Amino acid sequence: MASVLLLSLTLPLSTWHADAAFVGHSSLFPIPSPRRLRLSRHTAAPLDDAVAAPDISASVAADAAVPTAASFPLIQEYSHVDEDLSAAEDRPPAAERYDWLRAWYPVLLSESADRGHAHAVRVLGSSFCVWHDGNAWRCYVDRCPHRLAPLSEGIVDKYQHTITCAYHGWAFGGPDGKCLDIPQAKNTNVKFATKNKRACAQAVPCQVAQGHVWIWLDISPEGLKASATTPLPIVDELELPSFQSTWNDGRHFMYMRDMPYGAEALLENLLDPAHVPVTHHNSITLQGTKVSRESAGPLDMALASNVSMTDGFVSAVLGGWSRALDSYTVTFRPPCRLEYRTQKGERTNYMICYCVPQEPGRSRLFMRAASSIPQKYDVIPHFVRHMWETYFLNQDMVFPHQQERNILNQMAAVGAASGQSPQEGVPYDRVCFLPSASDVPTRSLRRWLHKFSPPGIIPTYANTYPRLQASSALGSAERDRSLLQDVYESHTKHCPICMGAMRNIRRGKLASLALAFLTSTATFTSALLRRTGVGSIALMSLAALASASSYVGLRWVEGRFIMIDFHHQDNHRDVVEKGAPAKAKKK
């Protein structure tokens, strides 16, 4: 087992990657460097049986009518780099601006989340307890009504279909959070006490679709009515039979990770194709050619739709990496969905990302890949794909974390100097210089935020905080790289696939260590007593060496589940050395 795991890590790898989506291939995503094994794409996870497929014929027909790259209208080319587009538009009145609370957000992966424990999740600065009662997923506000202790620390009983507060034993269940037991109440008072509405947990609307658990934040009477008529922000085309056929082959790709920066920074990073050759230098290949810093160049992008409060916007990649495709679009749908869609002949590929705002400086990323045509898959463990995705994300990690603080601080300074109202905010264009067409998606996102979500940020508190306070709410940037590059707390402990792999690797380490000790002892004893020939001693020595090497390799793999440190200076050393003078190279 240990040697097999070690071998799988020494072979070349590949995986889906959101950033890599920008480079295009015969399908949506490229493969890593030739030193890593090519790995076919995952398909989507099966739908929950309790969720009926909606009638989506109209919306699917609209999606299917995506024009080719050559026919995309250049609604906005952003040719005049000094034009303040965000400030040029009149904002709608407050009543017509985007309501972040009246929206559905994914919080867990429904197929892989542990159903034996309650999960504490945060969205827009509020805490929720999500749990499975044995029949369905439930969501309550993460406060026991008794003494406001966190329900997410409670005990889930799938047989009684309840969650019990671990502080005083109050039990709750059902979609309405009904109180079912109060141990401290006398028998004659239990029935009366549990029927009191104040004894009930605050239930939150909860649904399951396309492999995610979704919750609705506004639990006011008007908000609950709105939840019944507001559709989930899923990709309707994935409900078609051509995509459904790829759900059930067991080779889907779903990924979740907590990020040490806010959803605005995460959205901006994933919408940006231009950083791929530089940030991910030498990490991927495109049709046999390594994508590197030297391949960075002009990338023509343009808006293919208007910027809308409810529908977001669609941007098209018109040249560069997309030339081999019939069409290539990057779409933002509020509140938090990004989708990359490519089409080549009869094949349509998707990478869907949900960037969920948790609190200031924190967000949760969900990623899912799907294809309309079933793929042939190499036998590569899922945890290897997760490790590769984590490695890619760690290459970006330090940039958005510090960038969002720099942007907010600069906006606060510019706003204060110009007398700008903190509640209105400062347009993104006034603090960042965006001269190229590859910046179109970034500018469109910031334009949408500035127009429909003043002061241009996602409200990660119950009430929108002023722009001048936003930068201080984030605190100073984290200087400990190990915390930014952490993998265990941000992904591994939430992922049953990776936790299972790490347990097996630890068992393999013990087995390798024991085998190395036994074989080395046998080798030494045989050589000392001269009871075996030279050939046998050589074989035992090789076995001991192989066992020790397996232990070292498995220990390295185990470390990848805990922390992956990445330094761009080291990754770009080949470019630096290539430009060094001849004398310096000789030294």
Image (spheres, grey):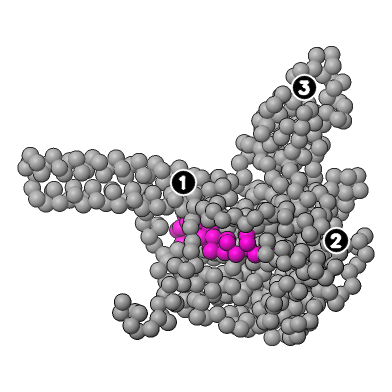
- Which stretch appears magenta? 378-404
Residue at 78% in and 59% down: 468
Q: Real-space Cα distance between discs 3 and 2?
A: 46 Å
The earlier-in-sequence mark between 3 and 2 is 3
Q: Is residue 157 visible?
A: no
Q: Pick out the residue farthest to the front.
A: 417
In this image, 399 relative to 2: left or right?
right
The amino acid pointed to by label 2 is Gln
Q: Regarding mark 2 in the picture, which secondary structure is present there?
A: loop
In this image, 391 relative to 516: left or right?
right
Give residue 324's position: percent from left, percent from top: 58, 81
| Residue density around tag 3, few if under 14, some if 14–19, many if 20 or more, within 10 Å | many
Q: Regarding mark 3 in the picture, which secondary structure is present there?
A: loop
Q: Real-space Cα distance between discs 2 and 1?
A: 48 Å
The earlier-in-sequence mark between 2 and 1 is 2
In this image, 347 relative to 308: left or right?
left
Magenta-colored segment: predominant secondary structure: helix
**Nearer to the camera, 125 or 65:** 125
* Circle 3 or circle 2, nearest the eye: 2
Residue at 69% in and 78% down: 434
Q: Is residue 573 visible?
A: yes
* Circle 1 residue: 502
The earlier-in-sequence mark between 3 and 1 is 3
* Circle 2 residue: 423
* Circle 3 residue: 182
The amino acid pointed to by label 3 is Ile
Q: Regarding mark 1 in the picture, which secondary structure is present there?
A: helix
The label shown at residue 32 is none
The amino acid pointed to by label 1 is Met
Vertical relation: 377 (above or below) 301: above
Vertical relation: 193 (above or below) 209: above
In this image, 535 relative to 433: left or right?
left
